């Protein structure tokens, strides 16, 4: 079959919830993808900030194959080895206390919301606790996560959503203060807003929110689903701020391709929230997913992934800054490490993304007018040079 035939087949049978770009990717190697015609693409999207290690890492693939031969799934009624190992590595990397594994980012957010409500309920037995979320945030598509996603377009058709959610402006401490009531039980935010357009939290803001939460015994939930796992230049972006969350959510690069997420609790929250019977999942933390997580942490250490991001990201920033200076329709660069965005004015980002794809470069958009760069964490300066050359061709 030709590429077009696979696209027609998918369009015929798959519910139309995505306007997909006209390409069928068949395989990947390193930072490169290949479509069914054999055309090569340089990948600066990593399956939306997922494939941190690049495609076809031999150690990663071998570990998964080994696990498939041993056991893929057992359920959470029993212990399994990879879950214990993955949870140990995730708590050690974060300095936090306890992990609950989920299948996706949105489920990690659902868990975090339940933790916050249970924590507050244990204190006063109330059923009317509130959560403060940020405008232009993105936390997922299930109803709880959608309720804290500050995007009217995503929310409107699905109301009523869960109650007790108030919205504040990101990087505006006064606007958060204005939403605090005696019923507030948590503040949720992305350490670096991803889908909303690549906005890193300002240090003063994050420290201010932390102090506010401490004063009133409100939980701080940091969503590290996109910016975590080395992407910012630290294992978790909040580690650069001198601010610790009570609850952290992870997914995307946590399994580097195998669907898995987690919410991670500090000691206080772990001791005063969910207990047996409160929460569950059939698949979450299954041996295959957790073997992926465990192997990802091993490879981050042995391949010095975080150090590589720290070392190489300034080069990406420099090259993107050059582009921003060169083209009058690129008004700014924003981001940290390998989560970067170029702000596009007066041209459609979707058209640029499509043109890049034609030229063999995979990039994605964020928000309405940001060209997003979330490459595999192993990209080199040579890859960055190739990316900018292809991007220049596309911008002609
Ligand atoms: C992608 C994303 C989510 C949702 O994760 P899914 O795995 O798609 O459910 C939540 N929060 C942030 C910051 C994300 O980038």
Image (tube, grey):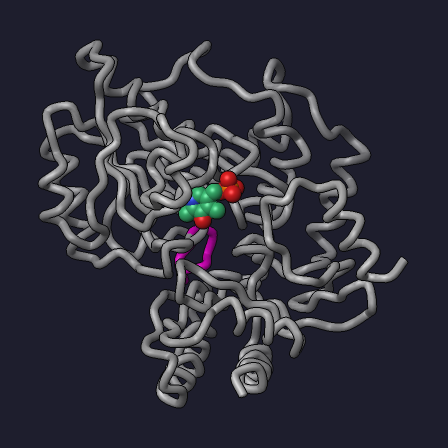
* Pick the front one: 36 or 269: 36
Q: Tell me if residue 302 comes above or below residue 308 in the rendering.
A: above
> On the picture, is 285 further left or further right than 36?
left
Q: Is residue 377 left or right of residue 336?
A: right
Q: In this view, does 58 lie above or below 211?
A: below
User: Which residue is pictured at 37% across the width and 71% down the height?
Assistant: 343
**Quadrant in which the N terminus is drawn:** bottom right
Total number of numbered labels? 0
Residue range (magenta): 228-235
Image-based side of 299 in relation to 313, left or right: right
Write the residue at 9% across / 34% down: 215
User: How far from the left and from the top, in percent, is residue 339?
Assistant: 43, 63
Q: In x, y percent, where is residue 76?
A: 59, 18
Classified by dominant secondary structure, the portion drawn in magenta counts as loop
- Residue 98 visible: no
In this view of the protein, which residue sits in the foreground, 305 or 5? 5
Asked whether, in this view, residue 81 is left or right of residue 320, the answer is right
């Amino acid at each position: 079959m030709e590429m077009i035939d696979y696209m027609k087949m998918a369009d015929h049978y798959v519910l139309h919830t995505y306007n997909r770009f006209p390409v069928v990717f068949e395989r990947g190697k390193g930072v490169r993808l290949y479509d069914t015609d054999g055309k090569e693409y340089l990948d600066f999207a990593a399956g939306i900030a997922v494939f941190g290690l690049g495609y076809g890492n031999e150690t990663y693939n071998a570990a998964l194959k080994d696990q498939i031969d041993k056991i893929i799934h057992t359920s959470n009624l029993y212990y399994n080895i990879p879950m214990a190992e993955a949870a140990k590595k995730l708590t050690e990397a974060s300095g936090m206390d306890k992990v609950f594994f989920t299948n996706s980012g949105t489920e990690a957010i659902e868990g975090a919301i339940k933790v916050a409500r249970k924590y507050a309920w244990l204190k006063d037995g109330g059923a009317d606790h509130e959560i403060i979320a940020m405008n232009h945030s993105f936390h997922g598509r299930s109803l709880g996560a959608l309720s804290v996603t500050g995007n009217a377009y995503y929310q409107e058709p699905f109301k009523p959503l869960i109650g007790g959610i108030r919205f504040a402006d990101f990087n505006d401490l006064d606007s958060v203060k204005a939403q605090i009531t005696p019923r507030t039980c948590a503040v949720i935010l992305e350490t670096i807003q991803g889908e909303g357009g690549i906005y890193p939290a300002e240090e003063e803001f994050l420290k201010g929110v932390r102090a506010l939460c401490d004063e009133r015994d409100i939980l701080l939930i940091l969503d590290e689903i996109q910016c975590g796992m080395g992407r910012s230049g630290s294992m978790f972006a909040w580690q650069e701020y001198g601010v610790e969350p009570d609850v952290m959510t992870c997914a995307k690069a946590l399994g580097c391709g195998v669907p898995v997420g987690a919410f991670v609790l500090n000691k206080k929250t772990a001791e005063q929230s969910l207990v047996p019977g409160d929460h569950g999942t059939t698949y979450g933390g299954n041996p295959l997913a957790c073997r992926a997580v465990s192997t990802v942490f091993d490879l981050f250490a042995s391949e010095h992934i975080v150090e590589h991001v720290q070392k190489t990201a300034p080069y990406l920033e420099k090259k993107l800054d050059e582009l921003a200076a060169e083209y009058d329709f690129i008004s700014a660069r924003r981001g940290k490490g390998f989560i970067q965005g170029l702000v596009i004015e007066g041209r459609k980002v979707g058209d640029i993304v499509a043109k890049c794809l034609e030229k063999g470069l995979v990039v994605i958009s964020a928000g309405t007018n940001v060209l997003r760069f979330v490459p595999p964490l192993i990209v080199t300066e040579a890859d960055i040079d190739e990316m900018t050359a292809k991007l220049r061709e596309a911008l002609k």
